[in-house]
Amino acid sequence: MATTLLDGIGLLVTNDPAYGDGSPLGEISGAALIADSGGQVLWVGPAPAAPSADSRIDLDGRCVVPGFVDSHAHLVFAGDRSAEFAARMTGQPYAAGGIRTTVAATRAAPDEQLALNLARLVLEMRRQGTTTVEIKSGYGLTVADEARALALAAEHTDETTYLGAHVVPDEYTSDPAAYVDLVTGPMLDACAPHARWIDVFCETGAFDADAARAVLTAGLARGLGARMHANQLGQGPGVRLACELGAASADHCTFLDDADVAALAGSGTVATLLPGVEFSTRSPYPDARRLLAAGATVALATDCNPGSCFTSSMPFCIALAVREMRMTPAEALWSATAGGAAALRRTDVGRLSPGARADLAVLDAPSYVHLAYRPGVPQIADTWVGGRPGLAGQ
């Protein structure tokens, strides 16, 4: 199996404390990395100690970080909601009901249109250093449309999430219980073969705690892992329910009380924060410092979607986390890489140490601090997926 030496790395972030400086980021200055053609990291360490390899690439002092792990994205959709964004910027509050606009457009779109838009967004993410992305359904809300969304998503990622319980569609507004029965019955039957996860939007205007429990319990019984949209629009039961059910992540976590924070800190449920949403909706930002101080595991993700947050940029979310949520640059980077991997219960991504996937981002900068220090400036010089440079992994 052929090997490649990445040499001349000014700063390497391994996210493995056993390497480098012993910090959570496992930083190594003046580093090198060897990957094989099978897509695995074989060796990391100081450049002068690097073993020989079949080929060598000089990165000329650039910083290398693990590829970003975006653990929350809604990429299978049609239509545009820029008018809704403009209205929010003039004072109209965000509400969950806007999702139905995208549902109507997505249902009407042919497969080819959805596939092209999905591929464009995944490529957009790849160009910004994202190497693993979770993709949800949730804009079809019929058996056939949810199943096709997941089948399309599965062409780009193993991290597919069934979100039939996004909102109650118009045709079920007079009988939401019947829609929950559909989500936990025939729709789950059609979608489970294409999904790894099940999710529910537990929020005023979407699904209450009883419905959310029914949805996640049904998915767990079918072998799917649980995730939850929780506590985005206000205080509610979502976070504690996610922790009780052993969900991999509770996402948003904007409005938390002490019991919510304690539940996250005392469980294996990751608090996934989505600062692009707060930017796009002019909502309060989550209190990341409070979660970190309590010992909760925090992830960062984009929540890329056409309504509440239409950004695909993890670097932008890192900059927001540092500026608006008071995370340090190191904490934000860890949360966008290893934190996202934890939210997906993955140990093979989000780090760059022997045995991990050779998924990495080469920054056109000497340090990862530049991701927040120079917001809005393109800084991804290259993205490697499975040990291959450029966009070969796409």
Image (cartoon, grey):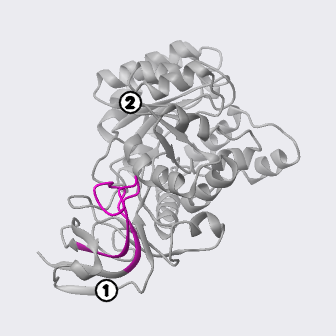
Identify the secondary structure beneath mark 1: strand
| In magenta segment, residue 25 | yes
Left or right of 76 in this view: 356: left
| In magenta segment, residue 217 | no
Q: Amino acid at mark 2?
A: Gly
Please, is residue 139 above or below residue 310 in the view? above
Q: Where is residue 225, by image quadrant?
A: top left
> Measuring 75% from the left and 40% from the top, which residue is drawn there?
283
- Give the Cα separation between the discs numbered 1 and 2: 39 Å
| Residue for badge 2 | 268
Q: Answer with mark 1 or mark 2, whichever residue precedes in sequence.
A: 1
> Measuring 67% from the left and 24% from the top, which residue is drawn there?
205
User: Depth check: 370 or 281 in front?
Assistant: 370
Identify the secondary structure beneath mark 2: loop
Q: Which mark is residue 145?
A: none
Q: Amino acid at mark 1?
A: Ile
User: Depth check: 349 or 366 in front?
Assistant: 366
**Residue 19, position as x, y percentages in the image:** 29, 60
Q: What is the quadrant of the N terminus in the image?
A: bottom left
**Residue 250, position as x, y percentages in the image:** 50, 32
> Measuring 25% from the left and 58% from the top, which residue is drawn there?
356
Residues drawn in magenta: 9-34
For the residue carrying disc 1, how many other residues have a C-alpha within 10 Å: few (<14), some (14-19), or many (20+)?
few
| Residue for badge 1 | 57
**Residue 94, position as x, y percentages in the image:** 75, 37
Residue 130 seen in the current view: yes
Q: Where is residue 101, by image quadrant?
A: top right
Left or right of 215 in this view: 286: right
Q: What is the quadrant of the C terminus in the image?
A: bottom left
